[in-house]
Structure formats: structure tokens, C-alpha cells
Image (spheres, helix red, strand yellow):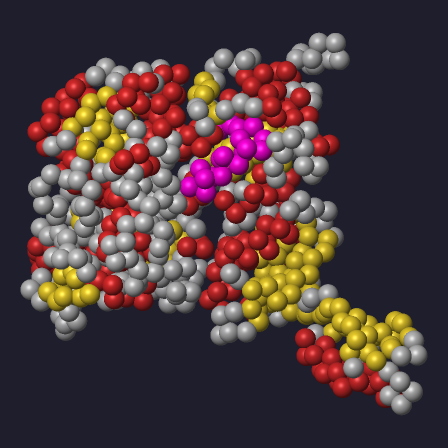
Amino acid sequence: MTPTQDSPDIRWSGAGALWASLEAHGVHTVFGYPGGAIMPVYDALTFFPQIRHILGRHEQGSIHAAEGWAKATGQLGVVLATSGPGATNLVTGLADAMLDSVPLLAITGNVASHLIGTDAFQEADITGITLPVTKHNYIVRSAEDVPRVIAEAIHIARSGRPGPVLVDIPKDVQLAACEYRPADLRPHPPLPPREPEPAALAAALELLTQAERPVMMVGGGALDAAAEVTALAHAWNIPVITTLMGLGAFPASDPLWLGMPGMHGSVAANRAISEADVLLGIGLRFDDRVTGRVRDFAPRASIIHVDLDAAELGKIVSTHCPVRADAAQVARALKEQAPSQIPERPDWLAQLEEWKGRGHHPEVWGAAQAVRQVVARLGPDDILSSDVGQHQMLAAQLARFERPRRWLNSGGLGTMGFGFPAAIGAALAEPDVVSMVIAGDGGFQMTAQELATLKHADIRNVKICIINNSYLGMVRQWQELFHGERYSEVELGHSNPDFLKLADAYGVPGWRAEDSASLDEALEGWLNHPGSALLEVVVPSQHHVFPMVPAGASLSEMLETEPVRAGVMQTGTVQDSPDGVEAPGDDMEAVPIMALDAQRGGER
Amino acid sequence: MSGEHLVSALVRDEPRVLTRITALFGRRGYNIKSLSVGATETPGISRMTFVVGGERGVVEQAMRQLQKLHDVLQIIDHSQEKYVDRELVLLKVRVDKDTRLEVRQMAEDFRARIVDAGRQALMFEVTGDEGKITAFIEQMRPFGILETMRTGRAALIRGSNADIASHVYGGESQALAALASGLSPVPQPREASSRDGGEQ
């Protein structure tokens, strides 16, 4: 069937080719929001009932939902938006997906080809705007190009280090007749996983063999290599640190697990980095939140850096042994070369065990205690997404992930408003598990309109937990510690909505807790409710997230616990010592915190 | 090693390819000192030659970032190969009846051609490598340079079939096959050498 002048058939158009291509690539759920310049695509959608479209309430919500889908499944997330404002509303999500390497396809409509460049109604140069925040982008010039461009875009989004790709389709191209055959729609075969160079592997083996105090550091690039990474750690008896993005790539119940590194990392992880003689990093990019002051990062260690992206090798930390390859391939190869007798490393592991006991939040009522009680209710297959801020760091510290892709958060961009829509996307991908989101009172309001999406798509497994401390807590923490307690524009409490009434307005039932006992009670009702539900936990506003490495400080200058009094904090420093391993706990010294230069202002 | 580094790239001749590349340099803070672009003998593929300023490590990082762009098919690092490079310069020099002869004589020594002549100025076209161009401009400077236009350096690896030939121009070439299928070949940049990373 082909369209004719007399009986145009939208199935055989550029718009139809788009849906047929997506279907041929296994896409069955998309997120989006219609508008003028993408109407032919939405028209054609009516002929593809196999594809489920999730109507959001704002394009930012839709793209974060697509990200949540992709982060939970490892599969492609797809989002659609119209031209102009619809397209520009995607920008935050694209930047987020770029920094967190999320495979994402964004389809935007644009004004008709002859209007492009004329400042037409709802015209935006979206390929120009998104150029730095996409892995690649396209503007499709003719309907016949649609299948080729979609196949290429999806291949790019998924291949190598994944990322977002945007395809902009002018309205006339969507409408133009297009005869496509099944052969035109075929996906490109995936690239084979990249094998390590034998020389690089040999160098890594040499370092590992000689290591006395090795540590592994595993990031988001190893989420699909969890089994191999775990086997590698066991075969060599190497303790494992998982970054914020890598949580779940190694089971938290394993005695070798040290927690998360970096600014709000565990004492054990940060001390291990400072004392290790070999650091094996797999699938991570040494973000500044992880390294602290770069020149003091892992000062005693030879660094082996495994990453698929050559541009990450040597970008931040200088590397003794760069290995450009697929994480699973390298982990498997290194595991196969493990010594026949597993190294025991008694001193090193005993030291780490001692550090594991330090820097924990006290069991007093506050955000940390609330998060602890909430995450304790998660099952091993349940998904936890978080927004950005104090609750995010607390959840990352306190939740225990046994498998990858159960922890969704905006790691690189730190996008407030990410958590809730991401939980919606994950809930749709996995309707049989709990998709829980922990958000702050600030961040939740950035995408709270997506409450309507729960009803629209009949989503029953999203559990929203708002940790309400009436403040932008992380900014408040920085203002208290680094800006002389000048609380500038961070108080939200007096103008916050009644979150239970807000949820109720969208038909979502709510629970509220204000202390540990009432939280336990509320958790029962909230979790047992057979449908999506909201829980507001009211907590004091003055608590901080600790441990903390101030921006610009080295990991060894970590502040393990709350300051004793405002303006002055206790810090334990790792001492230089001939044998390299030193219990630093006893020589605490007072450091004026203002002297620790807060180089970065706008914390969220 | 700080200074200038000569790098060429074979790129898909697609809309915005120049924007993608220059924007990447801009947002990551790499310094392009000169850039020349032109079509190659293969339809759909253009060649660019950059002069990139900065430490060796920064330049390597820049090359790796470039390699990630979908439209970049291949990067050629000229510091690793024997190459020929040339730049064309148009130079307008002030003359009067006392200096005219001397300027013309000097230009002849540099094999610069006069492409426009007036009573008060001569315009020269001079082609050569960096050293010759610099020397010519320095020789002309005392007479008064009115205007200059430089094309930027262009470079090719010496030999009949340098590495790019097999990769890009051969019948079974990866890039051409990739171009036909619309996909970029798997990039093959060199591994970072030890402790060479662009720290800080």
C-alpha cells in the first residue's frame, strides 16, 4: 500500500517509517508529549497499537522516565517531543544521559523544511542546541532517509560507551510518502565487545601480581560486567569500591565490599584509595566528586584504568596501565590469570575491616535514620531511584544493592527532578518489582506534575518517599560549612505544599511520618497499599551528610563525622609512614573549615 | 612538550561537521591555531589539518575526543609520521619608488609571486612550510605589511601508500564500507603512554 494524492496513508510516510523502524528495533514503549510539529508522527502512532506511548506532563519528565527505563534495563530509552519548546525541554535530560552514558533516542519534530531558519512558530535549532549534549544528532532531510537514520542513531546510542542521540524530523519529512521494505528497517549488528591488548593485559597482571594492598574501583561502565567483576575480586581477593554509578556492580553483602568513594564516600573506601599500592579501576571516569584533589588521589598506587572510551584514559588521573577494552572482557581475562593460591592479604583486609566500622551516621532521628529505615524495606530485586542532594548521598551510603541496575540516579549532571520520573520509567520496565524513589522536598517539586502520569499509564508500583527537611539540604549544608552559615535562599518549608494533599489531588494516596516509630507504621501502609503511593517523612533540617571530603581537599582530608562546633571540624589525616598503612584515627587535629577552600559554589 | 602540533582528520562531509569539531575544541578548552579544510578525491570525505596548541598530553586528549565524533573517520597525528606541510599566504606589502625593487628582489628569493601590483603596494602569493612563511613575513615586515591572509597549514603523510591509504582509500576500506553503511569505523587510537595524562 502506498499513499496517493487521493488517499494518503500515514503508515507509508516518513512518520510511519519512524514507527516501523522503532518496532523493528524492538522498541515497544516510548515516552513523549505531542505538539504541532510532530503531529504526523502521533497520527501514524495510531496505526501501531503494539507500541505503548506513555504521555507525560512535561517533556523533561518524559525524558527522565525514558532514562529510568534505560538505566533499569540497560536497553534503549525512547522519548518524543515536538519542535521548539518541546525540544528544548529535553535538553536537561539529554545532558544527563550524556554524562551518565545512558542509551537514549530522542525524536523531535521540527517545522517544515522550507521554514527552517526563518524563525518560524515553535522553531528552535535543536540539533545546534543539543550538539554538545548528545553523542550525535541528525536532521532528516527526506522521508526515505528515516529508516537509515533511525537504525544508525540507535546503533550509535547503544554501541561502545552508550549515550543519547537526537533525531530531528521536519514536519514535511514526516508527511512525505515513503515506501519502506522490511530489509530497510533492519538493525545494525551490534559491535563485538572490545578485547584488551595483550600487552596492556600483561602490564595489568604484573601490577596485580606484585600488589600487597590492591583495591578495585568499579563504576557505571561495569554494570553489565557485575558477574565478571565479582569473580575477579574473589579470585584475587581484592576489596571492591563501587562508585555512585557503580553501586550494585558488586554485591553489598560481600565481605570484600568497601562502599562508595569520594566526597560522601565511606571511610573504608577513601582510606583504601589513599593507602592502596595498586588501584584497578574498571568502567569509571574519575569524576572530581570521586577523586577529591587530583594530585593527592591514590598517592601510593599504581593505577590500572580499564575503560572502553579512550578519551577517559589519562583524562583526569595519570594512569600507569591504561586498558582500553570492554569491562567484562578484561575482568574475565584477569580472573583467568589469577594465582592458583588466592592471596590472603591478612594485614590489609584487617585494616580495611577496622575502617569499615567508622564514619557511620548516629542512630538519632533525622534524614539519615529515615533513609535507613526506608531502604531497609527494599527487596533485592526492587529498584531505588533517587533525586539529587542529601537524601541521594544518604541513600547511596545506606542502601545495599546486591545486583546492578537497581539504583538509578543522576550521577554526572546532578539533575534535581530526575528521581521521580526515572522511577516511573523503571516501574513501566519492571511492573513486578517496587520502583521506589527517594526525593527531597525541593527536587520532587521540579517534576511533581508527573504524578498525573501514574494515573494515565495505570502505574501501580511506584513508591514515592519525600524526605522533607524544609530546605535545599545540601546547599544548606555547604552554606553552613563553607559560607559562614549565611543561609541564602534555601528555606522551602514555609512555602512547600501539603504533599499529601498534592498527591491526593492526583489520586495518589499518601502517608506521613515524623519520627522513627511513626515511620515504621507509615511504611507498612505505604508499601502494602496495592498501588502507587506517596510517603512524606518530616525530618529536622540541620543534619549534614557525613563523611565528607570538602571540594578541593584530598580524600585523606575526609571529615568523618559532624563538626564539633560551627566553624571548626575534626579531621583525621592519614599519616605518611614507611609501611604505608597507618591507623589514622588517634591523631585528630582541628582544622578551621573555612580554610578548606570551597571551590565549587552551586551545590544542590 | 608544549608548542604546536599538526593533526589531520578525515571527516564525513556532513552539515555541521565543522561546527561539531570546532565546538568540541571550544568547550573543552583546546586551542586551534589554524585549520584548513577541503574535499578529498573520495566523494563525501573531507580532510582537515589542524595546528593545535598546548602540551602534548592535551593534544592527545583532543585527538581522542575528536575520534569519538561520529563524523570523524580518522585522525592522523603528524608527529608520528614523515609528512609534507604547506601553507599559502597572500601578503600585501607597502612599496614606494625607493623600496620597490628591493621588495621584488627579496620576494623572488622566496619564490613569492606577485599577484597584484600597484604604485603603492604589491600583493604576493607565497607557499611553503612554516619556516619559509615566517621568514618571508619577517623580511617583509620592515617595509610595511598592509594586509595578510593565511590559509592555515595543510599536510599529507609522505609515501605512496601511507597508513591512511590502506584504511581509507582501499577498495575494501573500513571507512568507505562504513560510509556506505552510514557507520563510522571502530576508532583505533593509540593507548595512553604511561603517566602522560593531562593532570588537572
Q: Give coordinates of residue A9: x percent, y percent.
A: 66, 13
Determine the residue located farthest toward the top in the rendered image: A7
Span of residues in magenta:
A79-96
Vertical placement of A226 versus B56: above or below?
Answer: above
Vertical placement of B150 versus A532: above or below?
Answer: below
Q: Residue at x 59, y 21 (%)?
A: A39
In the image: residue B6, left or right of residue A393: right
Q: Residue at x 69, y 61 (%)?
A: B36
Residue A208 appears in the picture as rendered: no
Q: Give coordinates of residue A393: x percent, y percent.
A: 24, 44
In front here: A542 or A318?
A542
Quarter of the image for residue B177 reads top right
In front here: A17 or A564?
A564
Residue A362 appears in the picture as rendered: yes
In the image: residue A177, left or right of residue A189: right
In the image: residue A219, left or right of residue B174: left
Q: Residue at x 17, y 40 (%)?
A: A540
Determine the residue located farthest toward the front in the rendered image: A494
In front here: A193 or B18?
B18
Q: Give coordinates of residue A14: x percent, y percent.
A: 64, 24
Quarter of the image for residue B116 reads bottom right
Q: Residue at x 67, y 37 (%)?
A: A119
Quarter of the image for residue B164 reads bottom right
In front here: A567 or A318?
A567
Q: Give coordinates of residue A228: x percent, y percent.
A: 28, 42
Any magenta on residue A84?
yes
Any magenta on residue A127?
no
